[in-house]
Amino acid sequence: MIWFEIILLTAIGAAGIMEPIRKRWRKELVVYIVIFLLGSALLILQTAGVKMPFLVDEISKFFKNVLHLSYD
Amino acid sequence: MNNKSWKFKNAAVTALSALLMLSLCGCWSYQELNNYSYVVGLGIDKGSSPGRFRIIEQLAVPSALKKGGGKDGDGGGTESFWNVESDGDTVFATIRDITRKVQRKPFYGHNKVLVFGNEIAREGIFPFIDFFVRDSEPRSTTWLVVAKNKADEILHHKPHLEKIPADKIEKILESHIYTSSYHNIQVREFVENMLSEGQAAVVPIIEIYEQKIIPSESKEEKGGSSRGGDEKKKPDTVLMINNCAVFKDYRMVGQLDNIESRSYSFVTNNAKGGIIVIDSPEGKEKLDIEFYGVKSKIKPIIKDEKPSISVTVKIRCGLADQQSKKNYATPEKLKKIGEKVNAEVKKEIMDCISKSKEMKADIFGFGNEIYRKSPKTWKKLKNNWDEEYKKLDVQVKVEANVEGTATIRSIAKPGEDK
Amino acid sequence: MQLEKGRFSSLELLFLVAGLMQGSIYVSTYTFSNTPRDEWLALLISWSIFLPFALMYLKLSEKYPGDSLVGIHDKVYGGLAGKILSAVYCMYFIISSAMNFRFPSAFLTINFMIATPVIAFAFFLVALCLFATTAGGVETVARLGIFNSVAVVASLLLYLVLLIPKIELPHFFPILDVPPKKLLHSVHIITSEYMGELFVLSSILPYVSDRNLLRKNYFRGISLGNFSFLLVAFLVTGVLGNEAAIFTGPLVETTRLVEVMNINARIEFVFMGFLIITAFYKCLILFYVTLVSITELLALRSYKLFALPLSLLIFSLVMLTNENGPATAAAGRNSWAFVSLIMLMIIPLVTSFVSLMKTAFRKTGR
């Protein structure tokens, strides 16, 4: 399943990456690769069952426990 | 844009569109109609062992319904319904357990009635009602009834005119508009009443009524019917709504008889039609007064933080049947009849209120009315509302307007009708 | 810096504003649990509190025409501080988008299609938004608004007509008997989470063509959105009363009670259709704003290029949010209102203030 996902994501990424390569937009290429890799990594790690930190929960706990700004 | 990139983009867009089109056919997690069995009635009784209860699911048999089936017996074949039972500790688990007996997954979206056994009702139905509100499949517009004895007797009773007992129960409940002697209630309204502080709910009681049929002499002379045994007084049984149960905190705490239930309907604006039997103002004969329009108003009066309730009931009615030969079609006599109706209905309502006070069950929602008028006063009363309700002063005013005597004045000969 | 040539009229802005607000209608469950009877009151109070903020967003946009949120931050706070603040906003938009994509998907599966995985709906929502932004851009986003708003208002009016027999006016009484904390909670959620989201339109306002009618249509859109909210409040309270507090989807439950001629009309499937439409539209606007903000922040040449990786990122965050469903719901109910308050109301207020000060100092300096 994960291998299928990796292959699919690579294909999708490759499809989109053609334009900055062709136009020689270096900054755009780097940003594209970074965001794409970040998204892919998150997706693959979750499919693999790795427990990810949940930012919304962390922010919520910060507001509740540190700032004492919460309704519960 | 060069040709190659245009083609590539086109291909990507086409591929994405094709992928998205998968969502349009609506096939995801679909089920064919014949993969489901349709639950039309559900009953809950006490189980065979302590702590357990029994669920009876009444499933419609579509093929039999189409053919117009319905023979004696209750086990499939050409019968239009099939009752399946299971014992368990919790509702959802027991319901799921039934799928081990039924080859199709039961679908609860068409469930019409929920019947509670009398014993379960007295112990409390809170553990059983959560599923019917929480789950998205059963509807909260399901009718709620309490069986006089056991729910499975009710669901096993073969109807005469309908094909499915649940259909019959639904039709009986809808017929309340002809007598107003019971109040039909849906699960949603019941839960709403239970969630309101101090409020009690009224649920109709359904029973199997035996009506004895004596065969005619001609049949006896011919040698009797094809049935064996004691045909002379073989009872014919019918399902009947008789009396109503009063629920407080999800537990049945008492009953209202038919007249009291009608009074309840009067006060709570649920009476749509029915007959009030009164004594004739000029004799001992009975008169049937048909009412066809009832409007009531409950007005809380708070004086020096002491609440009282004023109930006004306006009835539109007419003389529908009389045993007397007198002609009542004069304004003076109609006025007298109106006064009789006022007195009779007022007495019935006061009796009903007294009974509810004995049960400490605020079935009329007087507490809610006090809360709406003066939340401050209610906050002082709510913790001791049972006792406060017993002491609550309720003034009832009935205004009956007898509009006529239907199509005739009297069927007595001229001169006899004075 | 303007990333595209597309423009839309202020009339389309009206429906865009209304559509963004209406996107919260079908999932407005948090407030009914606090104020089942007084939701209308919470709405009116929120409206009156929010109006000055709406004006403030507009004035900020009018002061810097042609500049989106990132551009405004750059001009007000200067280079580094503006960029950091814009980066924080981009993070907020990404997280908010993920939560908004997840909520209707989970809602649909819980209430209608239990066997369908949440991810399926989320995938199609994300894919549709990707398609709409890359194929059309802001013009497509704005054009869909009229269809969305008309559909939502028509559906609400249909429910109103069908539910008139079930509405009981005593459910609205007594008025003003609500614990102040619960009323404050509801007002807070409505103001910061439902209405405050209009702040994201700062990135879209530069593309309005006829700016002379901008202010009028902007406030008309807010009024239409609020009218829709009030209609929902009236329906739910009138039909369910205090019972609205126990339901996770009060409006769904209300539509399930429709009985036409004593037959259950099963009209909640109509509701489901409109939920998908209106939720999609809100998600689309948030997706577009996120995309444009990131592109401007990093001074990139084209935003359409990044739609694909951003949609992948948001989809993976939706999966993560879905795994932590109860935590998300708890956050949304309790503490996220404070996050939204800071991001969508307090910081913009500070931005307006700083901008005013800068203008004043510039004038006195001269």
Image (cartoon, helix red, strand yellow):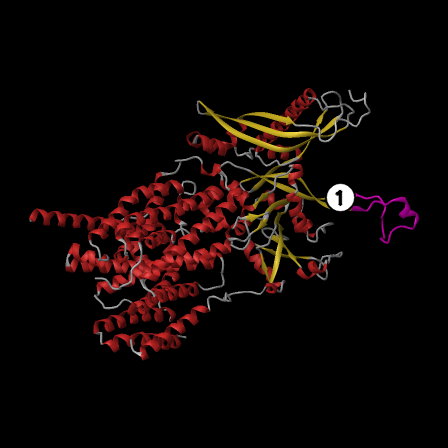
Is the N terminus of chain B in the top left, top right, bottom left or bottom right quadrant? Answer: bottom left
Q: Residue B281 is drawn in which quadrant?
A: top right
In the image, C85 versus A41, the foreground residue is C85
Is the C terminus of chain B in the top left, top right, bottom left or bottom right quadrant? Answer: top right
Farthest bottom residue in view: B4
Q: Residue at x 78, y 24 (%)?
A: B325
Farthest left residue in view: C366
Across and down, in percent, residue C350 comes to 20, 49
In the image, C156 versus C29, the foreground residue is C156
In the image, B197 versus C270, the foreground residue is C270
Magenta segment includes B214:
yes
Dominant secondary structure of the magenta stretch? loop
Mark 1 residue element = strand
Across and down, in percent, residue A25 comes to 22, 74
Across and down, in percent, residue B353 comes to 59, 30
* Residue C162 appearing in the image: yes
- Label count reads 1
Would you say B249 lies left or right of C69 here?
right
In the image, residue B417 above or below residue B160: above
Residue position marked by numbered label 1 in the rendering: B210
Residue stretch in magenta: B209-235
In the image, residue C271 above or below residue B381: below
Would you say C174 lies left or right of C310 here?
right
In the image, residue B97 above or below residue B240: below
Farthest right residue in view: B221
Chain bearing mark 1:
B
Across and down, in percent, residue C346 comes to 24, 49
In the image, residue C251 above or below residue B371: below
Type of the residue with mark 1: Glu
Magenta segment includes B234:
yes
